[in-house]
Image (spheres, coloured by chain):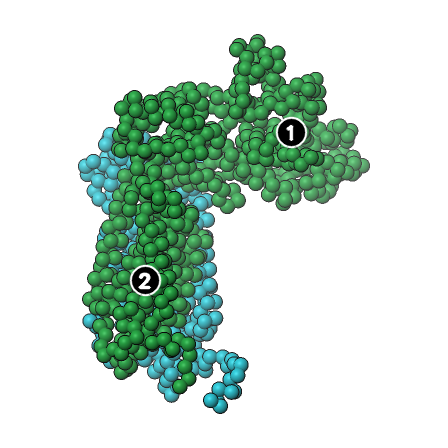
Chain colours: A cyan, B green
Amino acid sequence: MKILKSNLNIDFIKFKKIAAVFSVLLMIASIVTVSTKGLNFGLDFTGGTLIEVGYQSDADINKIKSDLNAAGFSKIMVQNFGTARDVIIRLAPVEGKDSSKIGNEVHAVLKKGSADVEMHRIEFVGASVGEELTEQGGLAIIVALIGILIYVSLRFEWKFALGSVAALAHDVLITVGLFSLIQMEFDLTVLAAVLAVIGYSLNDTIVVFDRIRENFLKLRKQDSSKVVNISLNQTLSRTIMTSITTMLVLLALFFLGGATIHGFATALIMGVLVGTYSSIYVASNVALALGICKEDLMPPEVEKEGADQEALM
Amino acid sequence: MFSNQTHMRPINTYPKWVYGLLVVLLSLMILYALPNIYGEDFAVQVTGEKGVAVTDDLFKEMQQELADKGITIKASSNEEGKVLVRLNSSEDQLSARDIIKEFVKDKGRFVVAPNFAPATPEWLKGLGGAPLKLGLDLRGGIHFLMEVDMESALKTREEQYISDIKTRLREDKVRYASVTRAKDLGLIAKFRSEELRDKAESVFRQNFAELTTRTREVGNLFEIVAALTPTKIKEIKDYAIKQNIATLRNRINELGVAEPLIQQQGSDRILIQLPGLQDSTRAKEIIGKTATLQFRLVNESAGYNPKRAPAGSEIIMERGKQNIAVRKSVIVDGTHLTDATVGFDERGLPQINVKLDSEGGSKMLATTSKNVGKPMAIVMIETKGVYEEVDGEQKLVSTYEEKEVASAPNIQSALGSSFRITGQFTPTEAHDLALVLRSGSLIAPIYIVEERTIGPSLGQQNIELGKTSILVGFVAVLIFMLIYYRAFGIVANIALVSNMVFIIAIMSLVPGAVLTLPGIAGIVLTVGMAVDANVLIFERIREELKEGTNPAQAIYNGYDKAFSTIADANVTTLIAALVLFGIGTGPVAGFAVTLFIGILTSMFTAIVGSRAIVNLMYGGKALNKISI
């Protein structure tokens, strides 16, 4: 079976300008939403308390709210989590060192309100821990990008390295932008997903670059943009195939993995879509714009032992 | 024609030993993945507190007691003093726990905890096989991250220095105007003349070398500004955290958890994991308590194992030994203890170096100078709670003090603020005693900065959801590959299934690798990405075929050309996984570990494994057509 025709020849380069405008617009939009709406950071980053409980029958959110208000908890958020019987209660971080007990107190109030309440989880994160995590998370993304930049520069060439990092920054920015737009909770697992997106998108980009390098050596007569276009066509069916298989498992996670893993699956699905697009349009176009040419990719002349004798045979 | 070694063999064949190696490797991996299909038994675990072993006699009595009470034991063992009783149901588990708890109550200090014991058969266990270790989010339990209040630890130490400095200056007859703490960190000693200050400076230099000093003049006063050296600060911080860990270990025994984890994280944090526990209120109460330590004289007139306590004394058990009578009056308590470390004496025998603050030192001197040659007891006092189950919850009903003599060495000479305890210690005993001393001394306050309590039902639910999504995603990919690549799809699928076996086997084998919910997500993601290598290879083969290369050569070229691409693409994902592992803790680290292992195994199975199968199918033959 084949998804694509064998003799594929899509002129990707023709859409170069449109794609560039599209990407830039998306990135600007992401920056705008992130800076105006911000991210709906989860407990891991903001600190605070979260209690997830389950009831035997549908939970009465309003009663829970009023019970807790009566008990002196004012700044609370009560929501259903996954099903109508499961409820999640969030409390903002409170000053003072004894805030770790809040979770237990809330649980006790709920227990008084209804005997059939079952504790699923209590999470408490101190504000300082959250701040640290935000710093570390940002740092992790930067360290990963630098590590990748170095590796790709060593294995390929700096123009490719910049191209791939531009594509990664593009993917991360747009994924984060989408999270800001739909205001979905951005927690630690989502951060992990964003880092996995980096890995995935890069995987795609490297495959394309590898083919470009090979074709530069093979098709010496062609100009750079032709070579890039041919390479993109040759790798297209693989790019799509891998996106499909990855998407299959991600959809399984999204629909069957449960509420805890929802944000993770969402981030990866977005990331895989954006990453597939960027490996075709962003990475190679940036490399092209930087003036990649076959001289950049010629294997360095290595003086081999006995290289001159070979001609005699 | 110019030819090399590889072309001597017919195309697309591996030497026989490669197949042999693959078969051996796969069998090994299947073997070590096997423990995961046996599940777990309900069990009760009994261990002695502070390293005390459960004797075989007690073990037999325990079994008899359970049998008498009508509990069927599935299996039980006593390995190195740790008893594990396996049972058939969770009801049996709970009643067995209560029966054993009641039974051992007056037989010593034991931790009786419900547990899940892997039902791995003996022969597999003998080979080192064990099932995957589940993270707290999957098995339920409590996770605490505690932070040691280092600022207050440093402040307390400075207060001690101030009192020591004042004493020292008084003794050396250097009159000071005041010695106080500076606003942030550091001390300021004020003098009325330059001469006095210079004298004081030399006192500082001789007696408090761990303080850096500088001088200044403010108004008509001459000052010495002293600060702790960075080395000393680090030492104090280290001490504060070690001491807290030692204390926490003691407390947590009381909680009755089968496999608690207590470890230092970073420079000032302590991670505590209590699998299977849910009542975080009670856990916090117990963890938050403090122990006290007292130095008291032994009442020798009563002799060993006295029947009645003489007036003004009480009978306390010496650890691992006999009862002794200890005087009720306290010489010095733990609040005056500033340090206790293990060192070695002139003969190379272990000793414990104890430091007291100046107030403690003078009290110690006053008492010990009159009692040389007599034993002094180091008494540990812990406040323990009595809990009763009320409406299904553990409630604190009363507290009692539990006392124990950690050691009762003889006083060899008058002791001051710095002395040593020698005796026939093994290095371990000396180390333990130093820990006991520290855990009873003034503690830098700790507080909880992070808590995650996962109820058992959520854990179970997470496992179920994880299993379902892995299964569905996995089957979907298998079907898709089969339809798309036909015969080669089967090859890729065999490689994919082997990859799963490899991941599970390696995760089970690697100590410290823990499966978490994000870890499961990592496995699912690996499944999706693992086929990528095969897709790359197969697409290459298709391209070669399209260009008119004969099928055998097309297979050869496909594998050959795709290799460097696969390697490059995977190394970059490995970098991302490594970074994740570096910054992440708990769940995120779990994700990174599975992703890392998954990438390595998938490269192996997709390149070497699938090649072997393809070679077996098509190797060494002239082919007209292949099914791809």
| SS state under label 1 | loop
Horizontal and vertical percent position of residue B59: 39, 27
At a point 79% along the width and 36% down the height, the residue shown is: B199
Alpha carbon distance from label 1 to label 2: 61 Å
Choose between B447 and B397: the one closer to the eye.
B397
Give the chain letter at badge 2: B
| Badge number at residue A214 | none
> Callout 2 environment at 10 Å: few (<14), some (14 to 19), or many (20+)?
many
Residue on which disc 2 sits: B530
What residue appears at the point 63 percent right and 32 percent down from the top-left corner?
A: B352
Residue B569 occupies which quadrant of the picture? bottom left
Identity of the residue drawn at 70% across and 35% down: B346
In the picture as drawn, the residue positioned furthest to the bottom comes out as: A312
| Amino acid at dot 1 | Thr
Can residue B39 be seen by looking at this rendering? Answer: yes
Q: Is residue B386 left or right of residue B489?
A: right
Camera-nearest residue between B25 and B560: B25
Determine the secondary structure under disc 2.
helix
Circle 1 chain: B
Instruction: Identify residue for label 1.
Output: B422
Whether residue B92 is situated above or below residue B309 in the rendered picture:
below
Displayed quadrant of residue B366: top right
Say which of marks 1 and 2 sits in front.
1
Front residue of this view, candidates B199 and B385: B385
x, y percentage for residue A291? 43, 79
Quadrant in the rendering for residue A163: bottom left
Q: Is residue A15 left or right of residue B373?
A: left
Task: Name the residue rendered at 23%, 72% in the picture.
Answer: B628
Q: Quadrant of the N terminus of chain A?
A: bottom left
